[in-house]
Amino acid sequence: MLAIVIGLVIGILLPMQTSVNSRLRTIVGSPFVASFLSFAIGTTFLTLTLLLTGQSFGIESSIFQGEPLWMWSGGLLGVIFLTGNILLFPRLGSVQTVIMPIFGQILMGLLIDHFGWFHSAVNVLTPWRVFGALLVLLGVVGTVALTDWINRRRGKLVATSQTGTGNLNVWRLVGIGTGMMSATQTAINGYLGTVLESALKGALVSFVVGTVTLLLILLVLRPSVEWRGLRGQPWWIWLGGIIGALFIGGNVLIVPMVGTGIAVVIVIVGLLCGSLLIDRFGWFGAAKNPVTGIQLVSLLVMVIGIMLIRLS
């Protein structure tokens, strides 16, 4: 039960991080600079938290020698997932940019559990688990696609594909691939936290790797920065990194408890709940949109799917 609560909470926080980082991007003028600032703030937050809790920063040399190299790649995969979404949005539109990676996350999460990849506990893929995953995906499609349909009916502008039909399927595969990388990051960070015997330390290592990766990207791409100043900006524009740190730390904590597949699914449900809350109350400068009964039914379908996966 604790893992489910943590997964739902960090999932709810994730779309809030997206809203915050989007606002930060409007200030600095570059998604990569905004992401770098977010990662740097998250790294600082985790460092201070580690100090306050009295935990050591040291890592025994035997861990570097005896553990696989992929154990340190979680932060890199996180950056790839983030960059992939930046590339997907103008090509697939808002709905498919959400659905395709989620499909990849669910697929990879179940495969990791079934085969025990990345030293995960083995949870054999049964017909009930497959059916539960399909219910979750059905709920995702119902929630996201319906929101898009409602926005269209209200005459609101939504992102549309700018890619030809021939390339569209390629970008859909890229979306599924980035989602699979996200689930892989979840499994890797879970194992990292277990080896280091600290969810905080595992999250910090992941954030440091991500921050260094983004710094290298900035040095190579040298994106233009359009600093617009902080006057009139809300205080919460700096919370994205802290939310991201809580998200990664929460994943590191719950994966050893329930496995990668169920952890991914729980977080996805929380993510969609958070998105609906932002729409309903207009948090972080978002436009207010009412939550419909069909959207609530879609969430219920996802909850049933989680129960099937968890109990089978």
Image (spheres, rainbow, N blue to C red):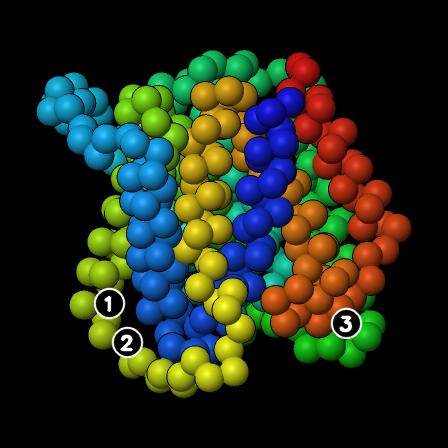
Q: Is residue 168 above or below residue 256?
A: below
The residue that label 2 is drawn on is 223
Q: Residue at x 86, y 50 (%)?
A: 294
Left or right placement of residue 139 versus residue 70 in this view? right
Quadrant where the C terminus sits is top right
Q: Residue at x 32, y 62 (%)?
A: 36
Q: Which mark is residue 218?
A: 1
Q: Is residue 269 above or below residue 194?
A: below
Expressed as whole percent of the image width and height from the top left, the position of residue 209 reads 25, 46
As helix, strand or loop, the secondary structure at mark 1 comes to: helix
Quadrant where the N terminus sits is top right
Q: Are marks 2 and 1 in contact (CB under 8 Å)?
A: yes
- Going from the N terminus, do you reach mark 1 or mark 3 first? 3
- Residue type, mark 3 in image: Arg
Farthest residue toward the right?
A: 293
Q: Is residue 170 visible?
A: no
The residue that label 3 is drawn on is 152
Q: Is residue 144 visible?
A: yes
Q: Residue at x 42, y 46 (%)?
A: 245
Q: Residue at x 80, y 50 (%)?
A: 295
Left or right placement of residue 112 versus residue 140 in this view? left
